Image: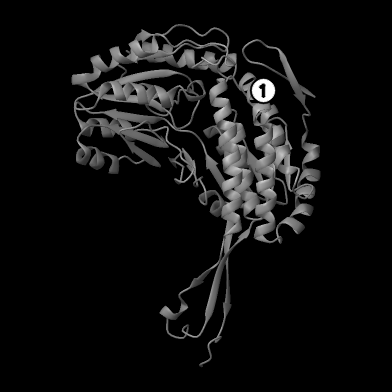
Amino acid sequence: MREITAIADARRLGEVVELGTEAVPGLVAHAQSAFTQWGCSAPHERADALQAGASQLAALSAQLAPIHAAESGKVITQARGELAGAVRMVSRNAELCRYAAAEVAPTGAFPGGENDLTIVERVPLGVVVAVIPFNFPVELAMEKAAAALAAGNTVIVKLPPQNPLATRAAVDAVAAGLPEGALQAVYGDNEFAAALCAAPGVAAVSLTGSVGAGVAVATATARLLRPLHLELGGNGAAIVLPDADLDYVVSESLRGRLLMNGQACAATKRIIAHRSIAAELTDRFAAALSSVSPSDPLLETARLGPLIDARAAARVQAQVEATIAAGATRVLGGAADGPWFAPTVLSAVPASAPIIGDDEVFGPVFPIVEVDSAEEALVVANATSLRLTAAVFSNDWPAAMQLAQRLDFGGVVVNGTNNYRPPIVPFGGVELAGAGREGLGYTMDELSRTRFIALRRLRGGQ
């Protein structure tokens, strides 16, 4: 058993069974057995079961929100929002499942095919392993699991090591109305996770996590040519041009960056500002953040809680100190105190500093890079392998749009935080930011495959 405690005050919250690698074959066999029933069930049956699961989860949300806030450090208002988003994700995937339909391929476009009828349908893969991170575990578990289940797969959810309790309860609530073994929540260490992802009988892996975790899973499964759906983080950039509304830039950047205490993949982690407005923008960031301090995440007024653990805060501290050593100036911020880390503003950050490249900062740090032109800003923004989302702030919409089209990221926002993830967009990155796309419909496509059935000469003829 593993005891789980609150980050802010170390009080005991609960415990979870920690499994070893010897448990993996049984878990997969259980999911395979459930697949024989679930995989051939009618879409309306799957939709009804998922809608019932959404209702079960909705009924538990008020109870789970404080647990989620305590074990993750996420402020309570955000914890409630995440649970509400998880309910919607299950419900909306149920509706997609209910009305999913096959397509007809245009075989009449080719000589000899005009009398054929070819149906193209999407079919499930089998057993899907979903590996969940600590930052948005409930919502991401539901996004992956509900889409996979809607497509007819069975799912094994690998819970995050730091904060599994709320996610386990959410998964159990949705699983209650499904065939036994169709949706399982499991907990184990990195060795267990690697064994699970590479186990015989697993059809696909959907993972959200670090680049290291993604590479480890890709390595462990390479010989199997197993489909991998990976979202591995990002070093998002916000380009601020001279004509931008600076107060709006600050408010939008804080709204996105402070989500989950600065531990969101799509948040703005690099601010690239034209030199003519960089000093003023820096002052406005410092003023806006001076009243924001980490506090008990269960307080209704909390805007910022602790990082996921003391080790995470120490890593952010080391990244800040390395950036200062490279020539940056700390305008606001201090030292880590256990898991607590105050908002930090860094000015005059060299474009060559590691955190402006591939050294993603998972904490409330606002590094500001000064550039002399939009072209230079574009070069700095694109100079990372972690190209998930980016933003452009300008009152010149045509110029902003032209710049947006040259940002080589998975998604670009003009005049808004790049921490933008409504469920109807294809969310995912470029290069080391991941492979595949998540969102309503997109995740279902990633976790299913096409199959065609051709009826030759159905319409007569030769």
Q: Position of residue 182 (x, y in %)?
A: 74, 48
Residue 8 percent coordinates (x, y): 62, 12
What SS does tag 1 mark? helix
How many badges with numbers are in the image?
1
Q: Residue at x 30, y 14 (%)?
A: 284
Residue at coordinates 65% horizontally, 27% vertically from top-left? 62
Q: Is residue 83 left or right of residue 324?
A: right
393 relative to 358 in the view: left or right: left
Instruction: Please determine whether, in this image, residue 436 is positioned above or below residue 190.
Output: below
Q: Quadrant location of residue 138?
A: top right
Q: Quadrant of the N terminus?
A: top right
Residue 52 visible, this orientation: yes
Q: Is residue 144 above or below residue 311?
A: below
Picture coordinates of residue 413, whole percent (x, y): 34, 37
The residue labelled by disc 1 is: 67
The amino acid marked with disc number 1 is Ile
Quadrant hosting residue 186: top right
Counting from the top left corner in percent of width and height, residue 109 is at: 41, 78
In the figure, 100 relative to 59: above or below?
below
